[in-house]
Structure formats: structure tokens, C-alpha cells
Image (tube, rainbow, N blue to C red):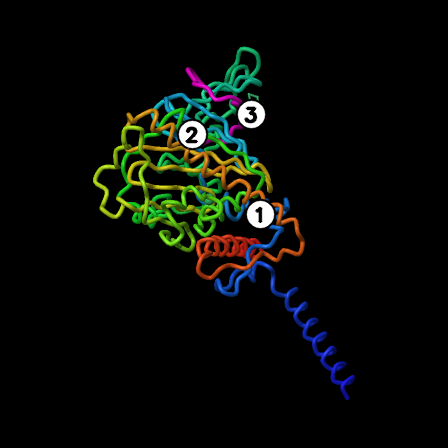
Amino acid sequence: MLFSNNAFSYYSILQIKMTYDAMMDYISELDLVLQNIGKARGLPNANYITNEAYEEEKEALIFNKWAGLAVASEVPNRGDVVPVIFFELPLLLVHDKSGEIRVFLNACRHRGMILIDQPQNIKGAIRCPYHSWCYSTEGKLINTPHVGGPGHNTHEDMRKDKLGLREITSHVWRDVVWINVNGNQKNFRSTIASVVERWADFEKPLYHGGKDSRFDLLVNCNWKLAVENYCESYHLPWVHPGLNTYSRLQDHYNIEKSELFSGQGTSLYKQIRGKNDEKFPDFRGISKKWRDCAEYLAIYPNVLLGVHRDHAFSVILNPQGPEKTLEQVNLYYAQKKTNRKLRKKNLTQWKKVFSEDIFVVEGMQRGRHTRFFDGGKFSPIMDGPTHCFHLWVASNIMGNRERKNEN
Ligand code: FES
Ligand SMILES: [Fe+2]
């Protein structure tokens, strides 16, 4: 009797297990992400380590969205141009002669030669080094030497007005140059409206702190892990013990806006001070709330922003493949002229904080190579902002697949 009972239990469990496996085949791993936080799993390993997932996300989460490319401060003067590789796409950031910031494909309309390979100031025209076709900084094709034979710079089949540089839709906000590569999004201001509303007090001129207010970090992780780590405060006590001495875990709050951003705030922001107690000036006219509060938002997909009463920063994540990400950090102030030593101290402080995060994002990346890791389990209380991002990733990938299947 005992034996047959055990046999029955074993058989039943086996059946349940087989049903479960079949069910799991049916439900994609992304479906498991799209559950409430108490039940959801994190994104599957493949989304952090495979070329296939990286390429799929490039289309669904980057080129189909407004994403951060660079900062406008990189091209401060008219005629400045900077080549940027963005998700393997060669682009050209341009401050044109009329004062506009523009983004073009960095490829000649003739034979596709890369036009610019070093940052520089263009005095005359953007000249292709191959056969010398020339473009204005506004992207117009203006000269095609010998195109109709030696000594003939025109030809009836050459419609210059149809052969300008391919322009990428762009918009500058908070010094970040945002681009929508596929040109399929509604305009930037309406897309970003809820962030602008939240941070209305900070819609003021931002002054980049100059050469001593930017730094890059190259980290061995998928770009999404940098977003996920940035938007939660759960890790602060262990990863940033210095910050935790004055802004403890319980002084932080989660911020979640599905489809656009998530992050965290502190209600105990402490201003940086110099030897003689000097401080940075505040942004003018900000409300009392910001005397003690500071907020940190990951604007999906790849821009991390922070605001404080006296300074702000942006981090643009520029992936170099599925497992490597360049983080470009820039610091801003409320006035053009600020104390140089204090700026340096602030830069050092932020460099330390962002560097402290490297071992965790790289450690999580290595963890994604463990095939038994199942995406992970969220804390229903502490991991809301990360779960919010995972929902956005999974739902946009699935939406993109559906659109492809329809076409
Ligand atoms: S490829 Fe640029 S002019 Fe020929
Ligand atoms: Fe951190």
C-alpha cells in the first residue's frame, strides 16, 4: 500500500512537471516578465548576452524611440562636428553655421565613405575625402567636382537637392541630444512631457562645467544593467557606504512612470561644500521641496539624469556590443561661472559614486552567463523602478514582434 501510494505521488508529480514544462514552452520568457511585481521574473539571460537579443532591442528599444546620443556641449561652436558611433550606426553630430544642432548619417551619398573621423571645426564645407563631394553643415550637397567628367562639376542625372546628407530626427533637451533614428515617434516635447512637468523647477538654463566636468567609464556589462542599477536605491547601504552616512535607505523613495522613466529620490540631499563653506549657487526660483530633495531618473532607454538644487548631471549609455557599455557623464550648474575647486570636488565625488557601481553591474553581467539563473526575483517593495523598466523592455520587444508579424 505504502509503495503504491509513493508510486502514485511520483507519477503525479512527474505529470505535473511535464505539464509545467510544456506550459513554460508555451509561455515565452518575456511573458513571465509581464506580471505584477510579486510574481514577475526578470528579463532572461539572453537579453544581456546574445547578439540576437541585442539586435532585436536595438530596433525595438533604441531606433524606434527617442534615445540619447551625446551632449550638445561637445559641439559648442558653429561649424563643430563630432563623429559618434551609436549602436554601430556611424553618425555625425553637427553645430551648423546657422546655430542649429543636427545629426546626420556620417556617410557620403556617393559611395558611402565615412565623411568625418575626428572631431573638428569645419571652416568651409564637409568634404568627403574620397572624391571631394562637399556638403554644407546644414547637410546640403553643394559641390560635386568632375562628376560630369573632367572639368564638369554637374550632370543632368545629378539632382543635388535630392542628395543631401541623410538627417536623423533630433532634439536637444537638458543639453542631451536625443535622436529618433527611425523617425517614427511623436515629437520629443510631447513624449517627454511628464518628466518636464515633474522637474518643471529645473527648466532653466544649464551651464556645463567645462572640461573638468565630464568623464567616461567603460564597463563590461549590457547597457540595461546600468539602467537597472541606477534606478534603484536598494543597493546604497552596501555599494555606496559613503552616501549612506547622510542619506540612508529610508530617506529614499521610488519613482515609476511606466512607458517612460523610473528612478529614485532622496529627501536628505546634502550640498557639497568647500573648505570655507562655499557652495554652488542654486537654480533660481526652485520650490522649497528641492532644498532637501534630489531625484535620479532613468529616462528609457539610455539616459540617466540627476537633479539637485545646485547642480545636475546626465549619463548617456552608449553600448559597444551586448556586453560592453560606454557611460558618458556630464555635470551642469546653475550659473556660467562657478568655483573651480568645488567643481573638481564634485566631479571627484560623482566619479567615486559611479565607479563604486562598476563591480555590481559587471558582476550581474557575469551572472547572466549562469544558465541556471532564471531572470531573478524582484523585491515587491524595493525593486519597483527596476521592474518598471523590465516591463517596458519586454512589452516593447513583444510589441515590435507583433508589428513585424503583421507586416
Ligand atoms: S564617396 Fe564621397 S565623394 Fe565619393
Ligand atoms: Fe549606485
Quadrant for the C terminus, please. bottom right
Q: CA distance from mark 3 to mark 1?
A: 36 Å
Which of label 3 and label 1 is nearer to you? 1
Q: CA distance from mark 2 to mark 3?
A: 27 Å
Q: Residues within 10 Å of mark 2 (few under 14, many from 20)?
A: some
Please name the predominant secondary structure of the magenta segment in the image: loop
Question: Which numbered disc, 1 or 2, marks the residue that appears first in the sequence?
Answer: 2
Residue at the spot x=53%, y=40% of the render? 358
Q: Residues within 10 Å of mark 1 (few under 14, many from 20)?
A: some
Residue 18 in the image: above or below residue 396: below
Are circles 3 and 1 on residues that touch, CB within 8 Å?
Answer: no
Three-letter amino acid code at the position of disc 2 = Arg
Provide the residue designation for mark 2: 214
Residue 246: x and y, percent? 36, 45
Q: Which SS class for mark 1?
A: helix
Tell me the magenta residue range: 102-125
Q: Can you tell which mark lies on residue 114?
A: 3
Residue at the spot x=42%, y=55% of the render? 258
Residue 149: x and y, percent? 57, 15
Q: Is residue 108 magenta?
A: yes
Q: CA distance from mark 1 to mark 2?
A: 26 Å
Residue 401: x and y, percent? 56, 54
Residue 340 in the image: above or below residue 70: above
Q: State the image quarter where residue 371 is shown.
A: bottom right
Residue at the spot x=53%, y=62% of the render? 40
Provide the residue designation for mark 1: 364
